[in-house]
Image: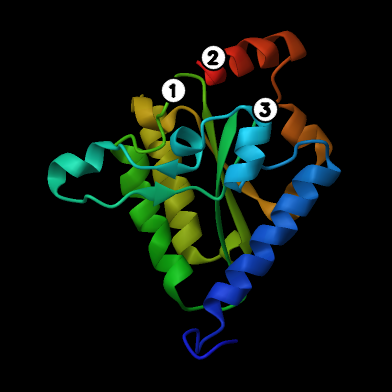
Amino acid sequence: MNELNHHDAADSGQRFELQTRNLFAQLGHPVLKYLSEFKEQGVDYYKYFSIKEHPLKQYGYQRGFETDGFVPTLNAMLEIKATKQELGTAQEKVFQDLLKIQYGVYNVEEGVKLLYILAGCMEYHECSVLFINLVNKFKKEGHPNFQNVHVLKLSEITSELLNQFSISSSTQQTVLQELLK
């Protein structure tokens, strides 16, 4: 805990993010997070991680958004919400993310998925239950920005689960070629 982080929230979130990245790597799906990793893979950092151009600009929000990573083997962006505390900002941020999904911030390209991962007490918190119910409601209603959103609990992620989202090697080549354009 540092003097700017009196309640340990940022440290807690970073620990869960590192845990998630390590799990994905162990299961054969490395997560890109840093500019150098994106460059090594030939993936556009500003399209899949640091999103500067987004639909909320038209409503006055000029800042960009950062995802928690991109997984090329799954063609998926990651958004991780995690905390070990029952009350805090992580619970509130799920609703900001709901707006980002609704307005298409994550819809950078057709076929790209958003894996929304809940960890720690966020796996069962009532805010998360409401978030999941709303995502499912909007999916059922056919809202296009929710069709590629998948909410997962970190404690339930297995190789079999992630492989459901995996893209074939021939599709990976096509995706990589598109990403390099």
Please rate how many residues cluster around mark 2, counting C-alpha atoms within 10 Å: few if below 14, some from 14 to 19, many from 20.
few
Is residue 138 placed above or below 93 in the rendered structure? above
Mark 1 lies on a secondary structure that is loop
Give x and y (percent) for residue 9: 54, 77
> Disc 3 marks which amino acid?
Phe
Residue at image location 45% in from the left, 67% down from the top? 91
x and y, in percent, of residue 181 in the image: 50, 15
Observer able to see residue 56: yes
Give the CA separation, mark 3 to mark 1: 16 Å
The residue most toward the left is 59
Q: Tell me if label 3 and label 2 are in contact, CB under 8 Å.
A: no
- Bin the neighbour count of mark 1 within 10 Å (Cα to Cα): few under 14, some 14-19, many 20 and up: few
* N-terminal label among 2 and 1: 1
The answer to which of marks 3 and 2 sits earlier in the sequence is 3
**Which residue position holds label 3?**
165
Q: Amino acid at mark 1?
A: Glu
The residue where tag 1 is placed is 109
